[in-house]
Image: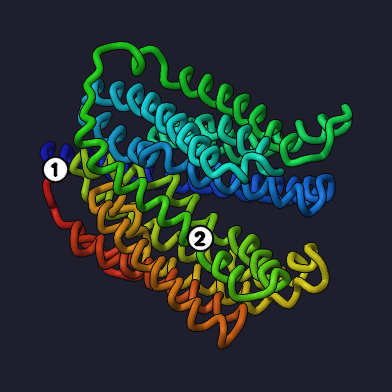
Amino acid sequence: MAAGLSVDAAFGAVLGRLKAVRAGAGFSAASVFAVRITAAGCAYIAQVLMARMMGGTEYGIFAAVWVWIAILGHSATLGLSQGACRFMPADEALGRHAEVRGFLIGGAAATMVGGLALSVLGLLILNIEGNLLAGPYGAPIVLGALVLPLFAFQDYLEGVARSRNWAVLAIAPPYLLRQGLIMAAMILAVLLGAPAKASVAVACTLFATALAVTIQASLLLKRLGPTTLTGSRRYRWRQWLAACLPIAAGDLATAAFGFVDVVLLGFLMSPDAVGLYFAATRIQQFVVFVHYAASAATAQRFTAAKARGDFTGLNALVRDQARWVLGATALVGAGIVVAAPLLLGLFGPEFRESLPVLTVLVLGSVGASLFGPGEDLLTMLGGEKLCAGITLAMLALGAGFCLVLVPWLGLIGAALAMAAVTILRAAGMALGAQAIHGIATPAFSKLFVRRASP
């Protein structure tokens, strides 16, 4: 009887821990989603105000420079931001504190060096080219080169905070605080007599990013505490970079995947048509935030569960994320489509013509959510090269579909092309996770976790 009670008690304790982990993941995902939605709303208002202050030409210069800061800034981390979510929870779970400290310090240094190197290389190339730095883009680009290392470092800090399941600390500074500071600094600068130019806007971005990074780093160091920061360090660069560099390539391909339709439309259709399509993609991003929130809350938990050998917990997390994301994506997507006439009308009456485009893009996001967190499993548990390969293949396929469908169907052709490859990409990730890790990720699959060695 005593033995039976002991087994029951042990099982109850394990079940309790599992429920706590799942509840924590759900709360974390909800927090991330709330912050991203709030930030997106603030960003939307900020972009409208900045466009009205600067005018179309100056705002276009600022937007172009900001896009390059974002793309290169994410790439400058060499994948170490995502790598923090993959390696640090596993090392922490296994008691390898020297490796945790090594990754924490080494990753920060490598990210800053990567950002500085990209900035210097970019300026050297543009200086050789000559024309761009001499024109209206010159001052904004030089200032943007100063922003780039700070942006990359903040991206790394986000990954470190996510690895500790500090979701709000991970995303509030870059997505809410930084954006608010940019807008406040720009308004103040114009009120003090500065011209409403792209160079002033990028200078405000530099100030805002530096302040947001300082605040986030200070809070993160305080929460990490002296125990985590002091002591011996062990660096496993070969293992880290072998995983992180393919992750970086996949991130770059994913960024390109998000813009390939707009870029091709710029060559195939009029600027007015591109504007109609781009407005639809900006609103569709609210649906994509569901997956981002779930990934930010659970990806690092997959790593920790596998490191502990907790395959039951891993199985439950995959199932919960798949079904939660599907339900939430469908719910948010339906709300976006219902509110689309109002949301599109805020851009101007003519933008309501984008409703079919937005509907198709939302259906693509919902269809992709059927296949669950295959991409997260490949990135966190192993299979990052396959993940990058699938994304690159879908990028090429999406470009091909656009080239065929846009001349035939116009804007709706581009939407159909991207919706199709978005679903195919998610399906490919699910098949990859099944093949490598023995985990069936689609939302209504009977999940099975093979007891492979960590």
For the N terminus, the quadrant is: top left
Give the answer, above or below, for where 303 lies relative to 262.
above
In this picture, is 25 found above or below 147? below
Q: Is residue 345 above or below residue 249?
A: below
Residue shown at the point (82%, 71%) measured from the top left: 349
| Viewer-closest of 274 and 16 | 274
- Give the mark nearest the N terminus, 2 or 1: 1
Q: Quadrant of residue 165?
A: top left
- For label 2, count other residues whose C-alpha is less than 10 Å away and answer few (under 14), some (14-19) or many (20+): some
- Amino acid type for the residue under numbered disc 1: Gly
Q: Which quadrant of the view contains residue 336? A: bottom right
Q: Which type of secondary structure does the marked residue at label 2 adopt?
A: helix
Residue identifier under label 1: 4
Mark 2 vs mark 1: in front: 2
Is residue 155 shown to the viewer in this render? no
Can residue 140 be seen at all in this image of the molecule?
yes
Q: How is the image coloured?
A: rainbow
Residue at 66% over, 27% down: 207
Quarter of the C terminus within the rendering: top left
Image side of residue 191 versus residue 230, left or right = right
Residue 70 point in image, percent of width and height: 54, 44
The Cα–Cα distance between marks 2 and 1, rounded to whole angstroms, is 56 Å
Report the residue at 16% width, 37% height from top.
6
Is residue 2 toward the left or the right of residue 163 in the image?
A: left
Residue 408 vs residue 209, the one in the foreground: 408
